[in-house]
Image: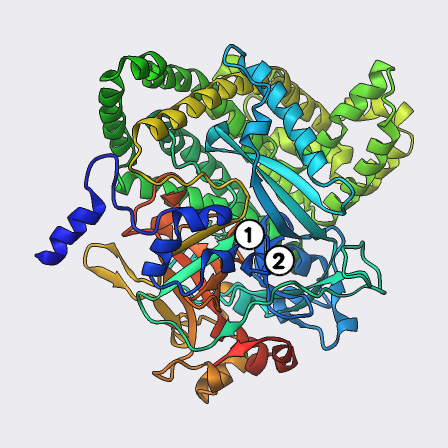
Amino acid sequence: MKKFILLVLICNFSIFNFCKADEGMWLPMFLKAMNETDMQSKGLKLSAEDIYSINKSSLKDAIVHFGGGCTAEIISDQGLMFTNHHCGYGQLQEHSTVENDLLTNGFWAKSHEEELPNPGLTATIIVRMEDVTKQVLANVTSGMTDAERDKKVNEAMVQIAKDAIKDTHYGAYIRPFFYGNEYYLFVTETFKDVRLVGAPPSSIGKFGGDTDNWMWPRHTGDFSIFRIYANKDNLPAEYSKDNVPYKPKYVIPISIKGIEENDFTMVYGFPGRTTEYLSSYAVNMIMNESDPAKVKIRETRLAIWDVDMKASDKVRIQYSAKYASLANYWKKWDGEIRGLKKADAINKKKLFEQDFLLKVNTDDDAKGKYGNLFSDFQKMYSEISPWSKQRDYHSEAIMGIEAVSVASYFYDIVDAIKSGKKASDLQKRIDGTKADVADFYKDFNAVADEKICAAMLKTYIDNIDKTKQASIFSEIEKKYKGDFKKYAKDIYSKSIFVSEEKVQEAMKNLDKNYKKIEKDPIYKLMYSCLSKYKQEVLPKYMELDAKIASLNRTYMKAMRELIIDKKYYPDANGTLRVAYGKASGYYPKDGVHYDFYTTLEGVMEKENPSVDEFIVFPKLKELYKNKDYGQYANKKGELPVAFCASNHTTGGNSGSPVFNGEGQLIGTNFDRNWEGTMSDIIYNPDQVRNIVLDVRFTLFVIDKFAGAGYLLNEMKIVK
Ligand code: ARG
Ligand code: GLU
């Protein structure tokens, strides 16, 4: 009873202030003011200054934005990093051939010389961050239109970022926070020579594949190892064999002491995008329109690829990365729909909005400023809904036809040549396109794509109102009477876009050949669809979206003004954040409980030699049979593989370090549970879990499985 009263006191159960334990992705520079006390009461032994400091080296100096889309952590004084297998997957694929298949066999560089360079891959570290709201909004006045405001804001952002890095080798960007109510500057240092050091075979790094993706309990050894190289002065440089391993400002120690349920956990990384403060109208559009449409379209594409990938090893390698990336959000959106329904998200938001409006209406000033917010939202979402649908079908279905997407590389170029007004950078664009074309055809299979084409066009005409379809559809209808297979067969047999040689040939003299491209049937299909999209759909969508953005800004301001007893964290936007919580199992459904950790035992339970995703390498089985786990076993003698915790994370947090209370690495974040994928929109503390690879499994694989124990000599391991 005492406990209950205490809980009520702490939580303050008003509609505005749920006690949502562990929700939030916090800005490192505000930890001291907003979170330090709370974090320490939950088990953090460090200070906020140990986590983020501009005066001394701190954890932040070892947190890396990996390739712009994932996170990595520095774990040696020679620039060695852990990230996820799926974050390095593109690089692993690039280095793979049928004869030397790094995906299937794994890869371990035995010396620095064997580490593989990855042109284009970057590693970015945050130097400092700063609130620049005042400066960004200095020239914004209340009477401005949204367009005028945007212009002033953009001008200021460019100037401030430029000034911030004057005479340095740093980069800088400014991002809006709280829907443009605040702006923060990030000064960065970006390394461009990042080499592959090691990765387990996919049967470990991707164990469970798409079947287990977004699922707990999980048994995936989802890690890979890279190293940052710098020039002799320890500064970022383009790849050169003279570069040397980077000496970081901070090295993360690794703990193999293990973790117990309810232990403090902290995730430090670069979450990509969340939208936690949306109105019920927005959630309705996502849950009932956009997500379901995208899920259905992707399902069709995946099923077609699957058949062709199973039939040929070449196609399997060509399409593995594309398949994984398409499948990933297909499954995420599906989980998100279910999670939103289960959390009764729309009704919860509606209740909140009703109460909020009551509050607004008690104050004349607030009523004047915010009284129409929800009716405005309602109006805007009913207007944007059909355009949003067209946008989804364009990007997911039409541009999901790969030959159409490669043809679209020529859309602007052909128009520029035709207009006679040759842009000064035309030749540069053509050269760039040549490289993109070469890149594209490495991983293209026309047989599968022809089937995709037929299926996608069918789905488009079945779902998009006839009056809103691109004009080519009435021609196809006339000539082919709805037989899209026949149409696809026809255009794929005639088009140059099914053959790299033909496209490269046409590019040799585009001044003349553009006419040939224009007559090409796949180009024509692309041209009609993309013109419709660029000239009609996108402008309208963007116009309405800008109005919604402005409403969101007002709504956010209103909430912070009127509900003052709540701590607000800004939505994820690809900037550095800290999330904290605890290791914790959960009840996914009535009567079912999931434990917070998994072990190698579970890998063996899932083993299935006849299903690709569940094959277990003989060497791993041998280690299992002999229980040869060395110092990596837990107290019960089991070999831990993964654990789940209540940290609030999202896409981009993959590869993020997961720390214990002492600031030691206990794992690498790699996923979220399916029941919790709606946490990008609404956080439900009993259901949302991030999924972490236990670092003991990582070290076990490096040491015992791969025999690459020499890498451990670089690391600081705490026993
Ligand atoms: N769901 C994880 C994330 O969002 C892992 C994705 C990669 N794995 C896969 N089987 N597709 O990125
Ligand atoms: N796998 C995701 C990523 O690549 C993390 C999972 C999530 O969305 O939480 O960032």
Q: Quadrant of the N terminus?
A: bottom left
> In the image, which is nearer the foreground, mark 1 or mark 2?
2
**Residue at which label 1 appears:** 324
Identify the secondary structure beneath mark 2. helix
Q: CA distance from mark 1 to mark 2?
A: 9 Å
Q: Is residue 64 left or right of residue 440?
A: left
Q: Disc 2 residue type?
A: Tyr
Q: Which residue is at the far front?
A: 55
Residue drawn at (55%, 83%), measured in percent from left and top?
Answer: 704
Query: Dot 1 surroundings within 10 Å: few (below 14), some, or many (20 or more)?
Result: some
Counting every numbered tag in the picture gives: 2
Q: Tell me which colouring the rendered structure shows.
A: rainbow
Identify the secondary structure beneath mark 1. helix
**Residue 372, picture quadrant:** top left
Q: Is residue 377 left or right of residue 272?
A: left
Q: Position of residue 158 (x, y in %)?
A: 68, 30
Q: Are marks 1 and 2 in contact (CB under 8 Å)?
A: yes
**Towards the viewer: 306 or 288:** 288
**Towards the viewer: 484 or 68:** 68
- Looking at mark 2, is its residue's CB closer than 8 Å to ligand 1? yes
Q: Is residue 322 left or right of residue 256?
A: right
Above or below residue 112? Residue 589 is above
**Residue at which label 2 appears:** 89
Q: Position of residue 348 (x, y in %)?
A: 25, 34
